[in-house]
Structures are given as C-alpha cells and as structure tokens.
Amino acid sequence: MSELAPMREQVYTDPRPKEHFDRFHERSRSREPDWTYEMTRVLTSLYGYTLLRARAISTEKVPGRGAVILAPNHFSFMDHFLMGAYIRRKVRFMAKSQLFKRPMQFVYTHGGVFPVRRGARDEETFITARTVLARQGAIAMYCEGGRSRTGKVAEQAKRGIGRLALETGAPVVPIAIYGSSRIRNWKRLQFPKVTVQYGDAMRWEAIEHPTREQQQAVADQVLAEIRRLYAGLEEYGRMGVLRRVREQRRAERRAHDGAAVA
C-alpha cells in the first residue's frame, strides 16, 4: 500500500477579528444555500463517482426532513462533498475560518458554509448551527475537529458535537468515509476507491446547559459508532458490508412479517 502524500502544516489561529466573520454567519442564519450548492454538488459528485469510484451505503438512514446532525470521520477536504453527494438534503457545513478568503469565500457563503474560528471560543458558530437546526436543517460536524494526519480515525472526540446534540436534541447520524485519506495522492495519479456508509441515527434528550462531561460522553459515543462502521468497511470491504446490510434488511422484513401474521 502506498504512503500518504504529506499534508500542509495546520494553521490553528486566524488573526482576523470575530467581527470580520459576522456577515458570513448572518447570511447562513437568514438564507438558504442557492444555485452554488447544486453546481458544486454536481461537479464534485462527478469527480467522486468516476475517479474515486465513490459509492454510498444506507443513505435511507438520513432523515428526509427535520433537524439532523451528520457526523463523518475526517481525512480529506473532499469528505463533506462525498458525504452530501448521495443524499437529497442540502447540508450546511462548518469550515475553518482561514478558508474564507477571495475568491472561494463566494462559493462557501452561497453554498451554505459558515466559518469556525479554531483556537478561539467561537460561540457564533454554535449560534449559527442552532439557528439552522431550529429551521429543521441539516448540519455536518466532524467529531475529530480537524483532518486526521495519520489516515486513521481519531481515538478521542472533540466535545463540540456533544454540546450541539444535547443543546438542540437533534438526532446525530454517524458516517464512515473509507478511502478518502488517499485522495491527496492525486498528484501521484493515485485515486482511491471511496465508500460512504451512513449509520443509525442516535438521539439524546435536550439539555439546556449540558456539562463538559455530558458533552464529552455524547461525543465519545458518536465517535465510537463511527469507528465501528469504519472498522466494518476495513474488515469486510464495500461488497462485504453491502451483503451484511442486505441480510440484516431481509431478517428485519421476515421478523416484521412474522409479527404481522401473529
């Protein structure tokens, strides 16, 4: 197996003041993504479906309506595109504030992306996320925070996703994206096969002011489920997991039919 191409050094602080990003948050809170979202979805989906041979498993586990938090593992800049390509909903993404520079900030803001200032206690990001969820929208949030630099799912979750899940009561759908760690090898003309598997929604009762311990406990549970899904893809491969999913569906249908007859 080839080595991973090196990543750029992470930049964890943004020198620009909070006020610089207010307009991006205001747009995300008051407006839906426009045609830019669909255009980006089409272009990135074509790339994913052809060169990356990307396919999805169990997309029906994402609720078709209502507030939901989508929680994938994070290896590549393509993860949010791959995660959103196979579901009909427009997903709102958090992105590090350093990306909000011309010319790409137009694509981000019109596509429904909003900034998070890493290294700062960025309450504006949570206000925006809660606003979107209150409007019954879909939010994507990474348990691990930034991208994994090792090509492995992190052992420890960041508690932010636990906080958002508890403050809003929105269900969380864990998602395993397998293969995307090697997308950055494209300069070597190496294109991995990527699989996106959606898990069963997880939900907790809303708590107005959850403690740090409660936030961390929920975040850890979400990450544990992501790791379980990822381990399945790693052990059985795409076709093996698909067979298992189909067998489980048949078993559930037989159980349902038996209960109906009884």
Image (cartoon, rainbow, N blue to C red):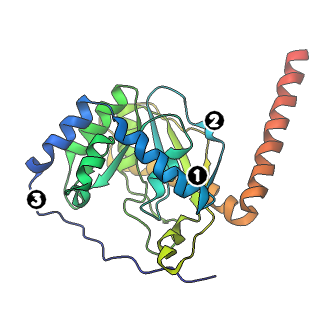
- Residue at point 20% right, 57% down? 101
Q: Is residue 218 left or right of residue 125?
A: right
Q: Which amino acid does label 3 sit on?
A: Arg
In percent of width and height, residue 149 lies at 43, 73
Q: Which of 215 and 165 is in front in this view?
A: 165
Per the image, label 2 sits on a secondary structure element best described as helix
- Residue at point 25% right, 33% down? 29
Q: Name the residue under label 3.
A: 16
Q: Is residue 139 visible?
A: no
Q: What residue type is labelled 2?
A: Glu
Structural crowding at the residue carrying mark 1, measured as other residues with C-alpha within 10 Å and reported as few (<14), some (14–19) or many (≥20)? some
In percent of width and height, residue 196 lies at 60, 53
Q: Name the residue under label 2.
A: 60
Which image quarter is the N terminus in? bottom right
Please report whichever mark, 3 or 2, sits nearer to the chain's N-terminal start: 3
Structural crowding at the residue carrying mark 3, measured as other residues with C-alpha within 10 Å and reported as few (<14), some (14–19) or many (≥20)? few
Which image quarter is the C terminus in? top right
Q: What residue type is labelled 1?
A: Glu
Q: How many labels does the image show?
A: 3
In percent of width and height, residue 38 lies at 43, 40
